Image: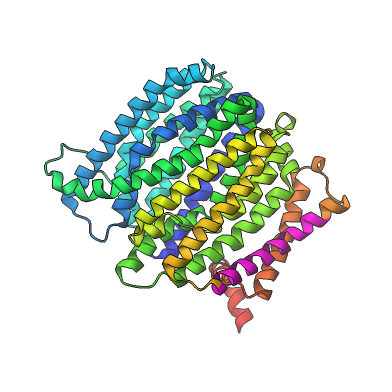
Amino acid sequence: MSIRRAALWSLASQYASFAIQFATSVIVSRFFLLPADVGLFSIALAAAMMFAIFQDLGISRFVSGQPEMKDEAIRDYAAVAVALGWFVALLVAAAALPLARFYQQPALLPIVLVIALSYAIVPLALVPAALLTRAMNFRALFVANAGSALAGGVTAFVCAAHGAGPGALAWGVLATAATRALIVLAFRPVFPRMIRDRSAVQPLLGFGSSSFVISCSAAIGLRSQDLIVGRLLGVVATGLFTRASALAAQLSTLVVGAINTVFYPAFARKRDAGEPLGEPYLHLVACNTALNWPAMLGLALAAEPVVLALYGPKWEAVAPLLRWTALGEIFFVAVPLQMDIPILLGRIKSLVWINLLDTVLTVLILGLACLYGVEAAAMSRLATGALWFAIYITFQKKLLAIPAQRIVMVYLRSGLCAVAAGFPLFTALQTGLYRAEMGLLPLVGLAGVGALFWLGALVLVRHPAWDEVKLMLGHLWPQPLRRARG
């Protein structure tokens, strides 16, 4: 499967999964759950994910990125994945009662236990999914991801409608894990066995030992946020903070997540062929920022009407938090594949130290910000994002030997395009032509005008992403474009 064809399937998977998960989130939050309910589930999930660092140990990256794969070792890799996954499930289950006591929230106990059960199922799909990624079979992954998202969404909705409260989201997680495992195994059956030759899994374990430190550090930096906010500011603040962070992250993933998923195996192939990665990486940065920066700027500008239209008045306190988290996301998307490129190029030890620095800064900044309230906690995402960007762009620039001037020009062009896209909405808000209570329809119209401004800016600044836009338009409307060229 070609890179562009794989990208289309990955994009379809991303959009379908996002649409289902987002619709579920909006419906369940608007009609059945309160911020405290979402906060309670977020604490449970964040705590469980802290243990999940033991689950993967880089198995997915190892399997999908290896230059050569020994077929006879695949079932041994699956055995390692399942053993680690079940160990994690036991750890999560054992932590349920202490966690409920620590936060003085008895309702955490059953939620954590259901999540632990899902963690016993997740590893069954780990190696099969990595093999599908390696083969760039994103068609199969589309079925698995969209199907499991639908199963999880329906389960969460039904449970919430029957009064399950925050536990409804946990049952949705379980249904998602079970459905994905069944579908992935149907496409690429791989079942664990007793390891016959330990030397077969030594490369995996060697890779995993370094990857574990990175996963551990990343998990602490990312997953500890809800735990810190929950402990210092309470479950209501956690629910508001989580909803703002999730909304910005979901939109970011929707816009560029599929592209990044495809590029990892594609870059692995280029590495194996001895091709330089600098130019394709610059193109990836250009596409990421050209697409994501306008989306994040628009979300920040329209935070209040978006929150009111989607979640209703009881969630209106999310709006000021969303504004800051969306702006912070601008930095996080500016350096794609910040983990994957160093791993592909054998610089995992350097990555470990850089990731540790990033984690320490994230935790310290958030902890200090929480002393001043939940909005300050959201504002800390902007400061953390700026530092994160400075750290990783410096490392990637050096690693890929990319001239600083080239990177600056890419960011400058993307920034101008983002400003152009946000100009109609900014003007309408400042002049009073659009107000939060007017709803989503006028907002969609302004976004459409912004999209036209964005396209014009792409052409004017000669942005690299314009070539991709032309290719996409050529697939959608080939005849008009041919006549225009003629």
Q: Position of residue 21 (x, y in %)?
A: 54, 39
Q: How is the image coloured?
A: rainbow
Quadrant hosting residue 234:
top right
Which residue is rendered at x = 19% and y = 52% of the image? Answer: 71
439, 230: nearer the viewer: 230
Queried whether the magenta region covers residue 411, the answer comes back as: yes
Which residue is rendered at x = 44% and y = 52% of the image? Answer: 354
Up/down of 150 relative to 269, above or below: above
Quadrant hosting residue 376:
top right
Left or right, residue 111 beside residue 85: right
Left or right, residue 296 beside residue 343: right
Up/down of 53 relative to 110, above or below: below
Left or right, residue 196 beside residue 101: left
Quadrant hosting residue 471:
bottom right
Is the magenta region chiefly helix, strand or loop? helix
Q: Position of residue 72 (x, y in %)?
A: 16, 49
Left or right, residue 252 beside residue 396: right
Quadrant (top left, top right, bottom left, bottom right) of the C terminus: bottom right
390, 27: nearer the viewer: 390
109, 175: nearer the viewer: 109
Quadrant (top left, top right, bottom left, bottom right) of the N terminus: bottom left
Up/down of 297 relative to 17, above or below: below
Q: Position of residue 90 (x, y in %)?
A: 33, 25
Q: Where does the magenta region start and end?
A: 405-427
* Number of dots carrying numbers: 0
Which residue is rendered at x = 50% and y = 68% of the image? Answer: 282
Residue 33, visible in the rendered structure? no
Residue 368, visible in the rendered structure? yes
Queried whether the magenta region covers residue 421, the answer comes back as: yes
Q: Position of residue 283 (x, y in %)?
A: 51, 68
**Extreme bottom residue here?**
486
